[in-house]
Image (cartoon, grey):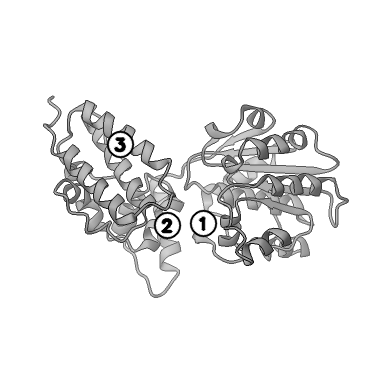
Amino acid sequence: MSGGIPTPGHVALAPWLQAQLQTCLAQRGHALLLAGPSGLGQYDLALALARAWLCEAPTEAGACGQCGSCHAVDVRTHADLCVLMPETLSQELAWPLDESAQKDIDDKKRKPSKLIRVDATRQAVSFTQFTRSRGNTKVVLVYPAERMNNESANTLLKTLEEPVGAVRLVLATEAADLLLPTIRSRCQTHTMAWPDEDQAIDWLLAQVNADPKHRATREQAQVWLQAAGGRPDDALDWAHSGLDAQAWTALPQALSRGDWTLMSGWPAARQLSVLQKLCHDLMAHASGGPPRFFPAAQLPPAPRWTALAQWSKELLMAARSVEHPFNPGLTQEAWAARTREVLSRQPQRA
């Protein structure tokens, strides 16, 4: 999400998203699926589309940004916009929850859901059947769409296929392969475009240096972008985390020595992501390809392919339970020991 949006308000689109907005606005059809890996701006683009569809004076470039409808979207009060997302994400992005859901959470009857609940999906379907409050259409925005379980997805299917009246739906996903085929088949798919490196770095510097307390160099921004695998929103998250560029480049060698200092205070999900990135780069290096996340010169010797393949499988399995409340200290110790063990194996022979 561009700028790491924590509060309501309009945020200008990144240049590569603005170009995609105009492309998407030119498409016909009532259901659009924005698909691509994380960090490419799916949410920002989906919200810009919803804003343009609801705008009272839209242009080819999108919403006017001045009308009452645009303001209502920006402050999260538009009566013809339904945003369907996990409750945890709704809270992060300042989208209001249904009163009953909010009451349950406030009364500590349950924790906010990390999935899109079927009750919320049913309410979204009901929303499409009500009369419009203003303008010519109603909009349902679903993000991230892969957070719908089968029951939620099946609840939305009929509306996706035959919406009642003037309704448009935009689904945004960071894992299209996890969506039901029946969901994908009922949408026009737009594949998210990647910005080129210079464009992404220029945008990243503009975001970081907008705060007078922070001054980032182009070299730092380049490291953040590499750490994110070229995904600008993820790079901005790295920048906001305070990642030291020199420490990142030295991280592979440090991990090979069992030095976990840099990552010791990071959340488990971020630690695991770094290990997966290191494993990816070592497998690429062992295959004769270029690394993606770390400088090639800073990588330790690649272990045998069989060891890397087994490690990759273990990391993938760990990702499935990384959000479970295991003891973080013990988990970190286990990962550190296993990383040092793998990286100490006999290097891959040419």
Look at 31% across and 34% down and name the residue there: 312
Compare residues 282 and 47 and report the one nearer the observer.
282
The quarter of the picture where the C terminus appears is top left
Q: Is residue 233 left or right of residue 306?
A: right
Label 1 sits on a secondary structure element that is helix
Q: Position of residue 275 (x, y in %)?
A: 29, 44
| Residue position for label 2 | 236
Q: Is residue 283 above or below residue 20?
A: above
Label 3 sits on a secondary structure element that is helix
Please report contact status of discs 2 and 1: CB closer than 8 Å, yes or no. yes
Q: Please tell me the numbered disc located at residue 280.
A: 3
Q: Position of residue 240 (x, y in %)?
A: 40, 63
Q: CA distance from mark 1 to mark 3?
A: 26 Å
Q: Please tell me the numbered disc located at residue 124.
A: none
Q: Is residue 105 above or below residue 161?
A: below
**Looking at the picture, which amino acid does disc 2 mark?**
Leu
Q: Residue furthest right?
A: 131
Compare residues 8 and 194 and report the one nearer the observer.
8
Q: CA distance from mark 2 to mark 3?
A: 21 Å
Q: Position of residue 133 (x, y in %)?
A: 85, 57
Q: Earlier in the sequence, mark 2 or mark 3?
A: 2
| Residue position for label 1 | 2
* Disc 2: CA contacts within 10 A as few (<14), some (14-19) or many (>=20): many
How many numbered marks have been drawn onto this rendered protein structure? Answer: 3
Label 2 sits on a secondary structure element that is helix
Residue 328 visible in the picture = yes
Of circles 2 and 3, the one toward us is: 3
